Image (tube, rainbow, N blue to C red):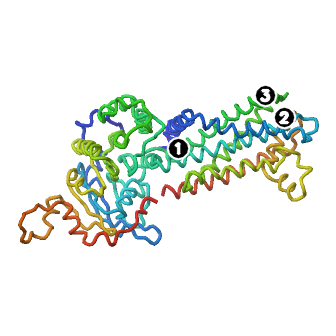
Amino acid sequence: MATHFLSDTAVLTGRTMRHVTRSLDTIVTTAITPIAMMLLFVYVFGGAIDTGTVSYVNYLLPGILLITIASGISYTAFRLFGDIQGGIFERFQSMPIARSGVLWAHVLTSLVATVISLVVVVGVALLMGFRSGAGVPAWLAVTGILLLFTLSLTWTAVIPGITAKTVDGASAFAYPLIFLPFISSAFVPTDTMPGPVRAFAENQPVTSIVNTIRGLLTQQPVGDGIWTALAWCAGILVVAHVVATIVYRRRIS
Amino acid sequence: MTRRQPSMLLVMSILPASDRAHGPAIHVQGLEKSYKQLKVLRGVDLDVARGSVLALLGSNGAGKTTVVRILSTLLRADAGTARVNGFDVATQAAGVRECISLTGQFAAVDEILSGRENLVLVARLRHLKDPGQVADSLLRRFSLTEAATRRVATYSGGMRRRLDIAMSLIGTPPVIFLDEPTAGLDPEARVEVWQAVRELAESGTTVLLTTQYLEEAEQLADRIAILHQGRIIVHGTLAELKQMLPPATVEYVEKQPSLEDVFFAVVGNAGQEATTESNRK
């Protein structure tokens, strides 16, 4: 059984990837909200926001990328929910294949689809004047953090994908995640926020991740922030994976 | 274990591991299952002989789907044992999955893929040698060749169901579960599905079929079991079941009892105790 895990997962991933490539609108929808926010903030609000020596588009991009990831993974929950409702999930479960391969296929597809959306968003940011002098190691670190964040949110998305009763319920969980960056250092520096808000903003995961990515892209030292960011990602990943596995087992037993 | 091509279906018979070749294909004893307060199965006993077609009859909510889900390792029973092809569904689930195929109440096909891609997908997951060829021969057999490259979303209900059954035949599993295979189909599509089931039976596959349509059971089944209030209350051939009807009283027209008459005679006041259709959740 285990010998087929990789090939089964590859076959199933090919299937879910076709779902993505045949409904390109999901990638467009994933990218369009963050792009619209980026336009709005850079060309409307940005002029009034003091980000010091960093240009606003450079300042904003890390938070926009996190919003892209959050809106992308809601489609993961949507696709998984569709499989369960449609009955094909049960067909797979009654077949002699590695059962966890079905979930992993959705997770891998989520990673690939999100990366495509991220590339689109970065492309638009470049057109809007985003520039970075960061070298290859810094870009690799940024990519790694974004992938890890996507992976942890994807496993989070698996939970509503399995447990939701309606299609709206399956994707609604992503809305708070999309808005989390607003109460962080993603759009404005946290210094001007009132005490409790500032305390929340500075201690929620988005701020440490955004600050780390921003630091890497603007060639500033990231300090211990990178470890906080990685710890958040890893922590969310572990908890989400455990919970997802439990609800999955409950679903299939 | 090596697999045979579906194109050889007519000449092949079930060849399970030799030590499992004896005894019934499906053996169920004392099966119980509750959903919270609702006792759906209260001790189901059932044997299905190798190569036979058994129709499991029952009203909505009688627990037919629950039985099928337990037998196809999708659901755990609360009590009792069930063996499929010699494998215990609880402790040897992987073995059971090797030798079964399930066609559920709702056509479990991928709407975004084409018909051919659906078949190739399942053939790959069953690790067959030439998935493309397997798909093409099934497309021919189920008259889907013309629609092969179209997305399943554009298929009619009958075409979906045919594709669904074709997907279940890939890898020629010796035991096939068909859960209400003709539910929601028009009469023409229903006849097409019946034809497919007959071909399966001729090839020696064991088929457990659930249905609420009594005519369907009459048409297809070697044996019929009636599931009512969580138990199998009658089990036999059509002829045996017909004998159970009380002898005809004085009537102007002599009428052969249909299976429908038998069903309601043995079930009694069926409608009043009908439970809710909650057995899919």
Q: Which chain is mark 1 on?
A: A
- Look at mark 1 in the image and give the residue it sits on: A101
Nearer to the camera, A109 or B71? A109
**Which of the numbered marks, if any, corresponds to residue A58?**
2
Which of label 1 and label 2 is nearer to you?
2
Q: Is residue B21 above or below residue A134?
A: below
Real-space Cα separation, disc 1 to disc 2, in angstroms? 39 Å
Mark 1 surroundings within 10 Å by alpha-carbon count, few (fewer than 14), some (14 through 19), many (20 or more)? many
- Look at mark 3 in the image and give the residue it sits on: A126
**Which of the numbered marks, if any, corresponds to residue B234?**
none
Which is nearer the N-term, disc 1 or disc 2?
A: 2
Mark 2 surroundings within 10 Å by alpha-carbon count, few (fewer than 14), some (14 through 19), many (20 or more)? many
Residue A140: which quarter of the image? top right
Real-space Cα separation, disc 3 to disc 1, in angstroms? 37 Å
Q: Which chain is mark 2 on?
A: A
Which of label 3 and label 1 is nearer to you?
3
Real-space Cα separation, disc 3 to disc 2, in angstroms? 10 Å
Mark 3 surroundings within 10 Å by alpha-carbon count, few (fewer than 14), some (14 through 19), many (20 or more)? some
Residue B119 position in % (x across, y down): 40, 36
Q: Tell me if I can see residue B15 in this picture.
A: no
At 80% across and 29% down in the image, what residue appears? A128
Query: Dot 2: what SS?
Result: helix
Residue A46 position in % (x across, y down): 86, 39
Residue A60 position in % (x across, y down): 82, 39
**What amino acid is at disc 1?**
Gly
Query: Dot 1: what SS?
Result: helix
Nearer to the camera, B8 or B276? B276
Which is nearer the N-term, disc 3 or disc 1?
A: 1
Residue B274 in the figure: left or right of residue A156: left
